[in-house]
Image: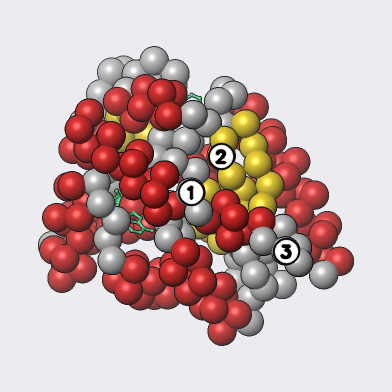
Amino acid sequence: MASDVVFLGGPGAGKGTQAQIFRDHGYRQISTGDLLRDNRARGTELGKRAEGYMQRGELVPDDLIVEMVAKALTDGASVLFDGFPRTIAQARALDELLASRGRGLPHAILFEIDRPLLEERLLGRWTNLRTGRVYHEKFNPPKVAGIDDEDGSELVQREDDKPDIVKRRLDVFEEQTRPLVEYYRKPPASRLVSVDATQPIERVTQQLLEALKIRASSWIAQ
Ligand code: ADP
Ligand code: AMP
């Protein structure tokens, strides 16, 4: 059975960075932020409906998000959900969606990191909007400033990585997404493990590999 995993953590915690790395470990990445930005770039109806929320740093309504994820979820490879779910309603909908597709309940990995470091990461982030690949001007700089090492695309600072919106996004995380920690920890069996997301990128990857290995054996036992 597929072992689907939710990356849970504030904006800037490093979820997207790790999700890209785990593509090489056989996982498929579903990043709702990337999917929404792609819809906006293509001018789809969904993109138009999501735009205002994203610009303000608010969450896009649950029904739009859940429908988008249901369309993106195909049979086969285990999926890493990056940036989804972000509300309790989305978490419940994901459990139901996976069950309806004959997949087990997802496990969650909490990226633990405090707010000042999240702010620093978001304010220094440079993004390739075409692929979702990210850099940081201090922690993970590209070889040439403003250019993606991999495909030569231009890197940009996202509009919602500006200070006011960053503050709002971090508040929204605390109010609406943090409660998912308890959701995934709930008895009878906790589905949550934590990693120290303040560590350098390679060290976080190591912790995730370890966590996924342990989880994989308990999934088999279930
Ligand atoms: P998220 O997807 O959780 O919003 P990102 O993966 O986009 O976070 O990372 C946010 C910023 O922090 C990016 O600029 C990225 O290069 C940088 N970053 C990611 N992981 C680390 C890390 N472990 N240490 C230092 N910087 C990191
Ligand atoms: P991200 O790239 O994950 O930081 O997401 C960027 C923006 O997209 C967020 O600030 C929200 O406006 C929107 N978004 C992404 N994922 C979700 C989600 N699961 N639920 C609601 N809104 C989302």
- Three-letter code for the amino acid on which mark 2 is drawn: Phe
Residue 149 x/y as whole percent:
37, 27
Residue positioned 34% across, 68% down in the render: 62
Q: Is 132 in front, or is 176?
A: 176
Q: Disc 1 or 3, which lies upstream in sequence?
A: 1
- Three-letter code for the amino acid on which mark 1 is drawn: Arg
Q: CA distance from mark 1 to mark 3?
A: 18 Å
Residue positioned 25% across, 51% down in the render: 58
Residue 205 x/y as whole percent:
63, 35
Q: Are marks 2 and 3 in contact (CB under 8 Å)?
A: no
The residue labelled by disc 1 is 178
Q: Quadrant location of residue 208?
A: top right
Q: Is 142 in front, or is 119?
A: 119
Kindly identify which numbered label has been placed on residue 187. 3
Q: Residues within 10 Å of mark 2 (few under 14, many from 20)?
A: many
The residue labelled by disc 2 is 111
Q: Residues within 10 Å of mark 3 (few under 14, many from 20)?
A: few
Q: Is mark 2 within 8 Å of ligand 1?
A: yes
Q: In the displayed orientation, state which residue is furthest to the right.
A: 221
Q: CA distance from mark 2 to mark 1?
A: 11 Å
Left or right, 218 with reference to 57: right
Q: CA distance from mark 2 to mark 3?
A: 21 Å
Q: Residues within 10 Å of mark 1 (few under 14, many from 20)?
A: some
Q: Is residue 33 above or below residue 209?
A: below
Residue 211 x/y as whole percent:
73, 45
SS assignment at label 3? loop
